[in-house]
Image (cartoon, rainbow, N blue to C red):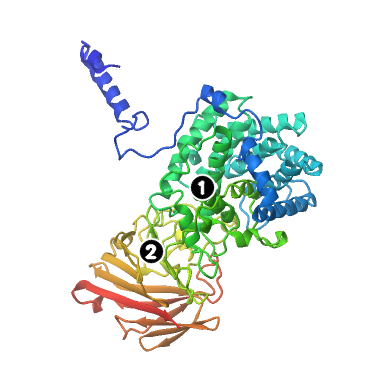
């Protein structure tokens, strides 16, 4: 409605209504279009998807998901000449032969007490099988692979449902079915193809459109569910686009719009808020989506260039320590998952940076490659697209902002002491977050001295009725040692939990020979302290200094400096000596040498629900508030090795 028209209206109420309606449409971000000159407008993926655009621009022939005629030609050329690609394919072929030895996929699998109450493990196994079988069939036209693919697809399509109440299961299953019929390109029986497409429509896509008209939360949320489920719906929609063009177009359009929310989490530097394990999980599906867009439409709609996305490859590599353990913050364990290696290959292909290509992993004997990705078939394709432009080394000091900021110091390529440090800010309410603002891990000479307790089995907790996922201040999650601040190397005040939504930010950072970073922990301790700032400094090639500047308040009773370790601890004047794996580490209390260190055993842990970590203990330095003059104090601790 034109503003000039409604101003001419005689009825005042109509004029008011029309004016309010006009204001709503220009002010509401759903309808308002960003001004091209407005640098504050949010970055968004291009989204031209309509039924007519889809019919005009979609690649008509299969394969068109990750592979197409041109991409496949490149892959086959690399298989003739590139030893790395040849060995990856050997591993895929080895695993395909192993699949042939197994029973057909079924819902009747032994119950694993660690598994969750869903079908995700089945969907993941199925995606693994399809990647191995379909890639070998695609390259060699091996009829054994085709027959087994047919049997697997028919079995999965005959499942009563793909478990839409836990839509990750549907997302991975839909991607697998779509790849199976696409990579076989009409070679499966017509009846199987028809069954597969019907199942993709009924058990996949339509299950994502609830009858009540609501939008599933995963469509627009900011975590890995967004990436996995939208990838599956995009692949499924392309697979059935000729059969159901309207359904396909509206689903792809919705997914592209929703994906913006998850992609924004990578900004500004690539630090993935859910930690390195979930970076591997979520990012591999965003990479799959980009590859599908490129093969099917010839462009990725801006996904690869989303702020922070390419930079996240640096983050992923820096979260692996010299001992090959992960920086295990958030719901993350120390052991890396294999799928991250193939995901990094995509970044290598996009940047030409050989640093991201793990040649050692890919050149191992097929039977010795651990944690082989269930997306290895896709990974083979984009690894074959790598063309070296140079090797850019990883930084020795790096910080990543965003929802869960982290800072990492290393010893670089030449690191005789195996120095590795990771520290973080953030807050408990971030996806898969913990009360770990100000926490740190520290590694020297292959020994992780200060640890993060990492993740623990979701399945065991859920089966016991434990409410793991709610994140209010008093929720069950914070009773767990792996989730609360008492199980992390940080500060605690008054023996209380951290403020769950109090976000600790990195407020200062410098690199160089002695890099340092300062984290403002004040929001973490609202109502407990007036202010707190923690600075980490790499003092030398085998020395880390942690300095806490604190101003107390009327509420402050006691401040506890904590460090979680599995080392043996000997208390000495001014600190402690830690011993582990034939190495020693000196802990020096530089600011309060007269305060005696105390050691609290956490093996066994406080609760029956807690994760058991062998020889776990918490080193504490406790400072009563009444000893602090003028309400201000500085704690300064040095950790130094040989």
Give neighbour class at mark 2: few <14, some 14-19, many 20+ (Cα, 10 Å): some
Q: Secondary structure at mark 2?
A: loop
Left or right of residue 541: residue 41: left
Which residue is identified by label 2? Answer: 497
Q: Does residue 163 appear anywhere in the picture?
A: no
Q: Secondary structure at mark 1?
A: helix
Residue 179 in the image: x percent, y percent? 66, 39
Residue 561 position by quadrant: bottom left
Identify which residue is drawn at 32% across, 33% down: 36
Residue 600 position by quadrant: bottom left
Q: Is residue 449 above or below residue 96?
A: below
Earlier-in-chain disc, 2 versus 1: 1
Residue 334 in the image: x percent, y percent? 54, 65
Label for residue 350?
1
- Toward the bottom, the furthest residue is 573
Q: Nearer the viewer, mark 2 or mark 1?
A: 1
Q: Is residue 640 above or below residue 54?
A: below
Near-viewer residue (538 or 249): 538
Whole-angstrom CA distance, mark 2 to mark 1, is 43 Å
């Amino acid at each position: 409605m034109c503003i000039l028209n409604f101003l001419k209206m005689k009825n005042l109420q109509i004029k008011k209504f029309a004016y309010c309606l006009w204001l709503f449409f220009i002010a509401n971000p759903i309808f308002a279009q960003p001004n091209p000159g407005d640098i504050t407008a949010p970055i968004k993926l291009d989204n031209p998807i309509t039924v007519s655009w889809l019919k005009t621009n979609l690649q008509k022939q299969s394969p068109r998901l990750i592979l197409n005629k041109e991409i496949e030609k490149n892959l086959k050329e690399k298989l003739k000449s590139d030893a790395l690609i040849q060995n990856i394919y050997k591993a895929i072929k080895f695993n395909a032969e192993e699949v042939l030895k197994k029973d057909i996929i079924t819902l009747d699998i032994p119950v694993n007490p660690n598994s969750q109450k869903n079908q995700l493990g089945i969907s993941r196994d199925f995606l693994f099988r399809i990647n191995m079988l379909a890639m070998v069939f695609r390259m060699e036209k091996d009829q054994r692979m085709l027959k087994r693919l047919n049997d697997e697809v028919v079995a999965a399509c005959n499942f009563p449902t793909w478990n839409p109440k836990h839509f990750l299961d549907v997302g991975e299953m839909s991607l697998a079915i779509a790849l199976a019929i696409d990579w076989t390109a009409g070679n499966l029986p017509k009846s199987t193809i028809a069954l597969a497409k019907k199942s993709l429509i009924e058990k996949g896509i339509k299950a994502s459109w609830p009858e009540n008209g609501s939008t599933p939360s995963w469509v627009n949320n900011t975590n890995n569910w967004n990436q996995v489920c939208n990838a599956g719906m995009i692949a499924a929609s392309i697979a059935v686009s000729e059969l159901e063009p309207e359904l396909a177009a509206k689903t792809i359009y919705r997914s592209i719009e929703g994906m913006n929310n998850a992609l924004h989490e990578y900004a500004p530097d690539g630090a993935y808020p859910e930690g390195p394990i979930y970076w591997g999980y979520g990012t591999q599906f965003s990479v799959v989506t980009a590859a599908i867009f490129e093969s099917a439409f010839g462009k990725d709609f801006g996904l690869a260039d989303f702020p922070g996305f390419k930079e996240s490859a640096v983050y992923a590599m820096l979260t692996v320590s010299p001992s090959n353990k992960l920086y295990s913050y958030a719901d993350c364990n120390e052991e890396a998952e294999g799928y991250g290696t193939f995901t990094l290959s995509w970044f290598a292909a996009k940047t030409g940076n050989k640093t991201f290509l793990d040649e050692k992993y890919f050149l191992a004997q097929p039977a010795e490659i651990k944690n082989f990705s269930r997306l290895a078939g896709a990974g083979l394709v984009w690894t074959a697209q790598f063309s070296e432009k140079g090797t850019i080394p990883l930084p020795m000091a790096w910080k990543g902002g965003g929802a869960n900021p982290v800072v990492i110091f290393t010893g670089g390529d030449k690191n005789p002491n195996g120095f590795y440090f990771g520290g973080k800010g953030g807050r408990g309410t971030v996806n898969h977050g913990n009360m770990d603002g100000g926490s740190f891990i520290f590694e020297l000479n292959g020994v992780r001295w200060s640890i993060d307790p990492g993740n623990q089995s979701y399945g065991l907790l859920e089966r016991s009725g434990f409410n793991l996922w709610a994140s209010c201040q008093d929720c069950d999650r914070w009773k767990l040692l792996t989730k609360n601040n008492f199980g992390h190397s940080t500060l605690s005040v008054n023996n209380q939990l951290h403020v769950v939504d109090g976000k600790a930010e990195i407020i200062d950072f410098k690199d160089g020979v002695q890099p340092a970073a300062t984290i403002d922990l004040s929001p973490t301790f609202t109502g407990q302290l007036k202010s707190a700032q923690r600075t980490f400094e790499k003092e030398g090639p085998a020395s880390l200094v942690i300095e806490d500047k604190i101003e107390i308040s009327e509420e402050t009773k006691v401040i506890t400096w904590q460090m979680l370790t599995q080392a043996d601890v000997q208390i000495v004047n001014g600190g402690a000596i830690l011993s582990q794996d034939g190495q020693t580490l000196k802990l020096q209390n530089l600011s309060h040498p007269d305060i005696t260190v105390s050691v609290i055993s956490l093996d066994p842990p406080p609760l029956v629900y807690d994760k058991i970590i062998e020889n776990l203990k918490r080193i504490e330095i406790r400072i009563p508030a009444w000893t602090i003059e003028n309400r201000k104090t500085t704690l300064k601790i040095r950790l130094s090795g040989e």
